[in-house]
Amino acid sequence: MDRTTIVLLIISFVIILLHVWGALEPSHYNWGVHFFAFFEPWISLLILMVVVLLAIPKIQSPLLKVFDRLLQLASKLPTLLVFLILGGIVIVSALLFPAKLHFLGDGAVLLRSVNERTISDEIAFSFRNQPLMQLIYLWTLNFYPPGSTVTTYDLYRTVDVIAALLFLVVLFWLVRMLQGPLLERVLLGCFVFFGAGSQFFFGYVENYVFFYVAIAAFVITGWRAFEKRIHLIIPLLVFVLMAGFHLGSLVFTPALLFLLFHRWKKHKLRAVILLASIAVAVSFLFFTMGFNVKNFLVHLTQGGVDFLQPFSGRRGNFPYPMFSLIHLVDWLNANMLIVPFGLILTTTLLVAHRSTIPWKKPIPVFLLITAGCGLFFTWIVNNAPGMARDWDLLASFFVPLLFATVYLMSQPLPWKPRGYALIVIVAVTFFHWASWIGVNASADRHLARMKLLNNPKLLSPVAQTAYDEALANFYFNRANYAEARYYYEHLVQIDDRNPRIIGNLADTYRKLGEKEKYFNTLQRAVQMNTQDAGVYSNLGVEYASRGDTSNAILYNEKALQLKPNQEKAHANLGILYAAKKDYPRADQHFRTAVELGMREPVLFRYAADVCLFLEDYTRALQYYDAYLERMPNDERVRKIRDKIRASLPRIGNP
């Protein structure tokens, strides 16, 4: 066993130990490796045992022979059949283990804001960096016949499946173009697929899935263009598509320039003209898709928040400065999540075999430039919601590192038992990937991890409020008001200037029966000039319960100023004006509440009583009938109703 193999095995065991640490002491500081903490201990122990056994040559060797024999048999099948089989496995797996909850991305926002047939103005802002995704979303609708029931989630899952199949095409291409034994080439293809970005294909609701595939396609087409196996125009077109899927891909421009000028170094003028033509074509394409230059320039202007500040992270959208230990920890976690072996393997192979790598060829230079551009972007971009949430944005920018690692591992370096080390590396990568998929596919595990990822040192204040609100809303909607209160109160400690959150906190106190906190929080929301009509209406009810009729009327009237069709405020005012014996005004509000659809029994009883005072016996009888339909055991009201009916025999049942 040579030195390189020993080093790679040591690296593998270091990564295994990191996962053991993450399983035993999960925290926000090890979010890239702590997934096994959310499974039963026996599962983690079983996987650890399997990986250790695979590292034993006497056990691994017969398994490799069997695997190699199966691959040789599969290689005799038509390529299309093999593709269909693997594609079917991926699609079935994605259907069996779809991501749940979507807390750690913009999935919840997209599901709430994207209409099934159009994209609203609100969500169009979310597509500002992905102009092509809006067109693809609308195009995907064509897969569904007119009049069919299709949800936003269905559309995103369709997009994910299409992207998964396209990614498999890229991997098939990669495996066929690599040199070396079939077993090693297939293992390298598995290494790429088991990058955590494949989570996109498992029902993940986000706009980055085609971007992930496009970057992989750009790297491999650039690679092939250097080998003169495909025309240069193909990676250029892929680059244009890549920019349409996300404008951040412009960071890979140095790699494109290297490709273009190296291939056309004898025709530099032609290269410049082509580049200018591409720039014009891209600009025209973006403008036809409604791209707004002003929105893009916001990312680059002074005072913007899209990129980390070098040495200061005091503003609300910055979790930490760029050059800080905490950023390094967060960034390394992102590396470990997306491609756990990528950075360390590439660095090790570059150092160990720097003299034997074919540097005179442009391919390794191109791949390292592309990988460097991607790493640069992930280092400078401001992930205010925490990298653990914005892993989906970062994943695509780590893809070139995957391919650079594959290239170095596929080279005929002085490294003999390559398959032995590869099987251990791929096994660890697979279990890491499977644990990530498994956590996201379980609502309980996903929620437990979400609660863990709320460290104020790794999240900006703005991000902490987003996390707290997401969790508070989740628990409130599931009637777990104690947990909802905890997260709303924590949110208010960070930002106490949001009247909407104050109103939500008040509603939580109401559900928990904490009347004084409820009353005080409602007053606080009103002092903050909340525009939530429900807050004013609820405060009016509280004043009424305290016998303060004047303030009760005042706040219910303010509720109607904000929302004239709020049935609850109309009902409250009907009761309040009835108590003041202002029966005409009370009747007006009761009538409006009923017209707006309110059907509570007490409303009909109060409305009927008011009609009696106004001597409108016909409507009184109607309201009493409606009340008794809902409360048939109220004998007192039944006697009143029957007395009215007897005195008005011509009316009968309405």
Image (tube, helix red, strand yellow):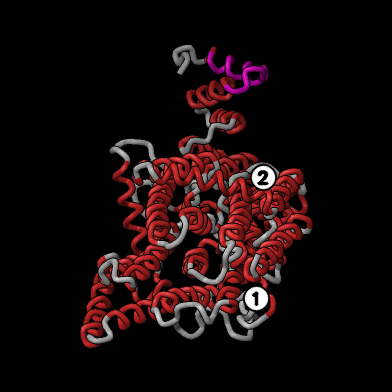
Mark 1, mark 2: which one is toward the viewer? 1
Mark 1 = which residue?
328
Q: Which residue is drawn at the image coordinates 64% and 64% (left, top)?
A: 465
Kind of residue at badge 1 = Leu
Magenta highlight range: 630-645
Say whether residue 303 is left or right of residue 387: left
- Crowd class of label 2 (few under 14; some 14 to 19; many from 20; radius 10 Å): some
Label 2 belongs to which residue?
Answer: 444
- Element marked by disc 2: helix
Give percent across and percent down for residue 135: 31, 57
Prevalent SS, magenta region: helix
Q: Position of residue 166 (x, y in %)?
A: 38, 53
User: In the rendered image, which quarter is residue 19 located in?
Assistant: bottom right
User: Residue 479 or 57: which is nearer the viewer?
Assistant: 57
Let me know if residue 238 appears in the view. Answer: yes
Tell me if mark 1 has few (under 14), some (14-19) or many (20+) residues whose alpha carbon lies within 10 angstroms of its own.
few
Left or right placement of residue 169 versus residue 90 in this view: left
Q: Earlier in the sequence, mark 1 or mark 2?
A: 1
Picture residue at 59% right of the left edge, 15% below the top: 643
Left or right, residue 21 beside residue 75: right
Residue 90 higher or lower than 311, as above or below: above
On whether residue 640 falls in the magenta region, the answer is: yes
